Image (cartoon, coloured by chain):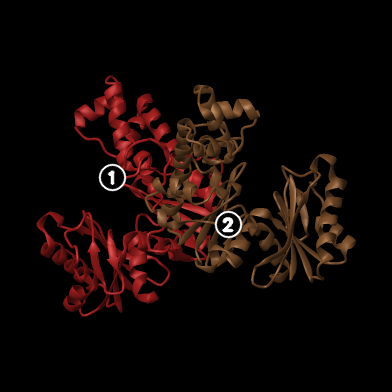
Chain colours: A red, B brown
């Protein structure tokens, strides 16, 4: 077994991964991001120590959202963690007496899919991750394709609406502006504002919350306004997926991200707008692809 | 040397290609498409015979626009040639006493670039071909990436305008609808209709012709209307190129097609709209990439 860590801005997911890719002792703790650098390093250390009580391991792998200097185990830059320019591998290695490896979280998730998920049935596939933004990864011939500078697979920033919505990336009309959970929340709010008598609007007034589940919940309770939001959103997702299928003709596109907990009914909504729906599949790894891929880091270096 | 043929709907380009990728005795003859199947086969035979007078060769390779059964040397389907379900390799081989190989023309062009063009300086690159439509090819690790069914790289059919112009492919808002030479001709006509006093409109009235050069010629003579057409068109091209750079992070994108005879000024117009203009280059193969790649077929099988 090896220890895998998925270090996010909010939560640290940890688990022991066996040689078949199964996760044992999965645990989720708080990252303590608001308390700053040392607090995050302590939370990370504790998460590892808690797992090491279960079993001794030859190495620890950590997936991190940001630009990682893989060779030296340094987090160079991260939008969501107060750890810029931190030699995390060295610090953790000293504290825990283990080899520690770092990698970008998207690459970890793709590695997890290659080893234990989509890769079991395909050698050329894409991963599309839908969350705050839309990310992705390219697996060709069972290996991660990284491009000239390691940044290949930023599917969220392909243009789907020329002269459309501006994106913080400086481009216009990026897919992410229409297909991310952030976009779904915006569409949900807009629909509620436009139809204040809808169940969707009522729910939002009562709870004071709009998130990625809001439209799904109202739609399940028969709200037509929410249903329309989901149709538009599913079409937005499909537009980019169609383009990726056209470009790559991959064996599969595996969809990842918490929003896909909505399961088969949501997948089918998206597939309605796809010319070749058979290429799409939901990740079977329960959001643990990143953790699995991180654990593998020590085995492949 | 080997004989390479680029069989188009209008013209047959032929030439002898040496081991360095240089083309000798380049010739262009008519395909005789309007005269039907036998006439085209005869034109093809004559083009080969004319070349074989120069030198004896071990094999002949033919690039064809359409769906090719490579293994059996059969053209299965072609939109531009009256040769559906024709065992071209067998027929030509009998007539000429040589091994004859067939391949899709886009793959030939990419093979030509890999061997003698862009591939000399890059191992991961894309080719984008702009003509009646927008096509392309993907070279990864110096090899053609074909995808699950051999159709990877149809860049012209990625969506750049959600809910935009319908495309004969049944999709909506395909890049090809905005970035092909066909699209440029449409934009040229529309601008001439809107500004009947422009030099562009005058030229069209005088010549009765609109083609891919019309706007370039008027712009060179100072026509602002034509200049605006070219700006919009260049932006349309850049939108898709930007997406491809984001997705692949390739070492290069090589631009091919007769329109790029407009050269550096046109490239620079496009680059103005690119976030990373340094990735773009014009093909250096003078429209002979397909012929070069076709000639190579015999050497690589």
**Left or right side of B183 for A38:** left
Q: Residue at x 40, y 67 (%)?
A: A21
Q: Residue at x 52, y 31 (%)?
A: B165
Quadrant assignment for the N terminus of chain A:
bottom left
Mark 2, other Cα within 10 Å: few <14 / some 14–19 / many ≥20: many
Mark 1, other Cα within 10 Å: few <14 / some 14–19 / many ≥20: few
Observer-nearest of B88 and B289: B289
**Left or right side of B39 for A231:** left
Observer-nearest of B276 and A228: B276
Quadrant assignment for the C terminus of chain A:
bottom left
Whether residue B126 is visible to the viewer of this picture, yes or no, is: yes
Q: Secondary structure at mark 1?
A: loop
Observer-nearest of B212 and B73: B212
Q: From this view, report whether residue A301 is shown above or below residue B188.
A: below
Q: Which numbered dot is residue B147?
A: 2
Furthest residue in direction top, as rendered: A197
Q: Image quarter for residue B184?
A: top right
Observer-nearest of B163 and A54: B163
Measured in 3D between alpha carbons, the distance from the residue under mark 2 to the one under mark 1, in whole angstroms, is 32 Å
Q: Mark 1 = which residue?
A: A168
Q: Chain of mark 2?
A: B
Q: Position of residue B36 (x, y in %)?
A: 84, 42
Disc tally is: 2
**Left or right side of B116 for A282:** left
Q: Chain of mark 1?
A: A
Q: Which numbered dot is residue B119?
A: none
């Amino acid at each position: 077994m090896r220890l895998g860590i998925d270090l996010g801005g909010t939560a640290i997911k940890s688990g022991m991964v066996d040689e078949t890719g199964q996760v044992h002792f999965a645990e989720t703790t708080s990252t303590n991001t608001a308390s700053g650098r040392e607090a995050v390093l302590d939370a990370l250390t504790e998460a590892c120590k808690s797992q090491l009580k279960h079993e001794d391991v030859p190495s620890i792998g950590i997936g991190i959202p940001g630009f990682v200097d893989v060779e030296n185990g340094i987090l160079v830059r991260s939008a969501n963690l107060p750890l810029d320019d931190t030699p995390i591998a060295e610090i953790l290695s000293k504290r825990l007496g283990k080899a520690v490896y770092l990698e970008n979280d998207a690459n970890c998730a793709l590695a997890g899919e290659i080893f234990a998920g989509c890769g079991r049935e395909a050698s050329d596939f894409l991963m599309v991750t839908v969350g705050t933004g839309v990310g992705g990864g390219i697996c060709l011939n069972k290996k991660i394709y990284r491009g000239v500078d390691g940044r290949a697979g930023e599917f969220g920033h392909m243009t789907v609406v020329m002269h459309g919505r501006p994106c913080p990336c400086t481009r216009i009309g990026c897919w992410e502006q229409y297909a991310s959970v952030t976009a779904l929340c915006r569409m949900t709010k807009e629909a509620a504002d436009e139809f204040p008598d809808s169940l969707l609007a009522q729910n939002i007034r009562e709870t004071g919350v709009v998130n990625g589940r809001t439209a799904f919940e109202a739609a399940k309770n028969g709200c037509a306004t929410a249903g329309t939001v989901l149709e538009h959103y599913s079409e937005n997702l499909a537009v980019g997926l169609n383009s990726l299928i056209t470009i790559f003709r991959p064996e599969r596109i595996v969809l990842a991200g918490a929003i896909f907990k909505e399961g088969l009914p949501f997948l089918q909504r998206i597939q309605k707008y796809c010319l070749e729906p058979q290429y799409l599949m939901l990740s079977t790894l329960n959001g643990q692809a990143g953790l699995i891929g991180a654990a593998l880091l020590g085995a492949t270096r």
